[in-house]
Image (tube, rainbow, N blue to C red):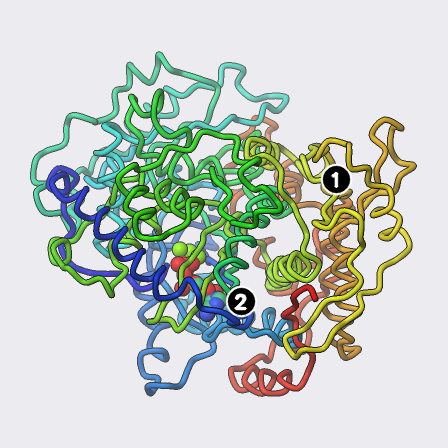
Amino acid sequence: MGLLSTGHPLSWKASQPYIREVKRKGIRQFIHVYRATRNREDDCLRWGDEVEYTVLHVDKSRHKISLSLRAPEILEELQKQEHLQPEGSSVEVLWRPEYANWMVEGTPGVPYRCFAGDLELVEQNMMLRRLEIFSVLEKNEIVLSITAFPLLGVGNFTTPVQPVLGRASLSLYVPDAAINPHPRFPTLTRNIRHRRGKKVDIRRPVYYDEKTDKEFPVLPQCLAHQNGCNEGTNNHHSSTPIGDSEIEEEDMIDLEQLAKESTPDIYMDCMAFGMGCCCLQVTLQAKDMDESRYLYDQLAVFAPIMLAMTAATPVIKGYLLDTDSRWDIICGAVDDRTSEEMLNGPKKSRYDSIDLFVSSRKEMIPERYNDVEALLDEESYHTLLENGVDDRLAKHIAHLFIRDPLVIYEETVHAQDEHSTEHFENIQSTNWNTVRLKPPSLELNAGWRTEFRPMEVQFTDFENAAFAVFTVLVSRVIIAFDLNFYIPISLVDRNMKAAQCRDAVQQQKFYFRRNVFADNSHIPDRFKCACGRTHKPRFSSSVQECCLSVCSSCSDCEPMTIDQIINGKSIDELHSDHNFAFPGLISLIRGYLDALELPPESALKIGNYLDFISAKAKGELLTTASWIRKFVHNHEAYRHDSVITELICYDLLKAIHDITTGKRIEHELLGNFYQGKGECNEVSAEMLQEMRTKVEKGPTLLASKD
Ligand code: ADP
Ligand code: MG
Ligand code: MG
Ligand code: MG
Ligand code: MG
């Protein structure tokens, strides 16, 4: 989330007359940016990660850990340094608000650059973030990078305890006091509900263990909670939207209706169940618009692979799930479609995988792969075309603009400012997809960027750094070797589903392109660096064989395991009728890095990240989700009934805390790749600044094919 606009948000009802106007202005604003920047070229690689953290309150005597709702205060403390900073200088870490009052988001203070050495700054910067948060916590608080709090929505799960059935969410489980008080967030919550016409209804399958209630019920879950906690409906939020004074009885939950729809699912009823989950994102600046659009497409195909690799959500709302990831929980949590639209409208929630590839590279025929129906906002589409935006980009933007603006501010709705991007961002930033194409921003001094959004956050800085660095390196080989990952979007959708299955890394196959070399007949033999030098990648003989084995008449893609996609496979592993080899992305990355001739220490450190990723893909290490499952199953208080008790939750989070701080070594999760923090515990802003200056002399990562 960039900077938050402020003002008085309109209720859904009061927004109605302005919806079209906001869309028209948003399109005008995009056209303005597009005209000014479509020919912008030769931007350098810049990139950054975003990590979302959870603040928890520990009650040692009662063996209870709950979510601390102090994030707004904590954020204020954390941002002090940034606010005190003289104009023109920068801090090492930027802190930003997130949806829930238990979340804060940290990013590097300045984006990383094209130097290979910057890859080594990531983990250090993440450590500094933890130190910074740690320094502003209260005595009984801890901070973790976990995707979902296991007891989210169960009983009194916040500190302080707050009443449920608040007016923004009407949730039976999550108090509105857990929603960030900035007017954007309660208004999003309420307006999604009002647009939809009823509360969001999230159902995810429970994991059936030996003693799980065979008729795992929706209704008793609701009733039990409602009977226990509906004393307080007088939870007034400071930011009641304009025009929303009416009592909202109309969409109070209908328990009888729910009973009829009863399914063996875990039922969740508000935005916080999804937007209260934490993730790891990476944004990459491309050299120009075309490169950014190409990366968008390639990374969209790669998203499910990384979702599976980082899966970390086997537990929510006090139950073991039958799935491992947060993704579909959030899709449901912000799904603002009406019942009529569910049948005839957009096929997906505004939070989901993409529907359209956007690259204009003709030789790859991206439109061949756009095989799912994607509605367009016709008016936006025609305006974009009339103003010189090419068809594919116009479709991309017009598809984003099928969604309504959810938060309109009274103060800015009439502003005619083409130089602002507020209205465009209003729509853009509430299309929460696996990837996002970010147009240049004067304010941020940034060029065309592609954001990679599927990953779940991991426990340690080491893991988060490894996944962020790996993402950057994947993007580098895509560009350096002009890789082609295109498969039909329908298969990307199918991969997204597979990615969320239990232990997807080991149990599922993913459609992937058999031949990722855009130039069918040739193995890439050179690429060019930002410094202008030409490099020769060094590939193993097996990679070379792969290229030779590809037969062009074969189908484009094939179900593969994640191990095969990441680590490669040789020809003899396969049935003769599907005979092809696949190089594996890691070998391509190694070939690329070898050519850059990194200093030995850097090569070692980055090599260690790659070895870690490779071991994850092989299944030699557990995913975070599998590790959590195993922990629960082995806990002496677990009764094999899918239920996570307060004690199990306490011990689980305590174990995670010990892993994060290096006190507990978990070989099944981390192997020998990470052995606690050691001397790096001492990281400081000064150290980071020094490192940054040092690496400027080293090799650069930016690469383009000769
Ligand atoms: P959002 O939440 O909208 O994705 P944030 O500001 O939270 O935006 O995060 C933006 C990310 O992009 C950060 O990791 C930041 O370091 C990175 N970033 C900032 N400027 C650039 C740039 N010019 N190119 C690429 N990445 C950038
Ligand atoms: Mg965020
Ligand atoms: Mg952000
Ligand atoms: Mg964001
Ligand atoms: Mg982001």
Left or right, 406 with reference to 68: left
Relative to 346, is 164 on the left or the right? left
Q: Which mark is residue 514?
A: 1
> Which quarter of the picture shows residue 201?
top left
Residue 538 horizontal/vertical position (percent): 84, 64
Residue 450: x percent and y percent?
Answer: 49, 57
Q: Position of residue 82 (x, y in %)?
A: 36, 78
> What residue is shown at x 85% (from left), y 52% (from top)?
543
| Residue displayed at 58% across by 54% down | 458
Q: Would residue 82 appear left or right of 177 to someone viewing this image?
A: right
Q: Nearer the viewer, residue 60 or 241?
A: 241
Q: Going from the N terminus, do you reach mark 2 or mark 1 first? A: 2
Amino acid at dot 2: Lys
Q: Quadrant of the N terminus?
A: bottom left
Tell me the residue at 37%/46% (across/down): 397
Q: Secondary structure at mark 2?
A: loop
Q: Is residue 115 above or below residue 201?
A: below
Among the 4 quarters of the image, the one containing residue 377: top left
Q: Is residue 264 visible?
A: yes
Q: Is residue 592 above or below residue 633?
A: below
**Few, some or many C-alpha atoms within 10 Å of disc 1 (few <14, some 14-19, many ≥20)?**
many
The quarter of the picture showing ligand 2: bottom left
Quadrant of image for the C terminus: bottom right
State the SS at label 1: loop
Q: Residue at x 65, y 79 (%)?
A: 531
The location of residue 18, given as percent across then percent down, is 14, 44
Q: Is residue 634 left or right of residue 423?
A: right
**What is the distance, in whole Å, between disc 2 and disc 1 at their CAs?**
28 Å
- Alpha-carbon neighbours of circle 2 within 10 Å: few (<14), some, or many (≥20)? many
Q: Is residue 107 visible?
A: no
Say what amino acid the circle numbered 1 marks: Arg
Q: Which residue is mark 2?
A: 287
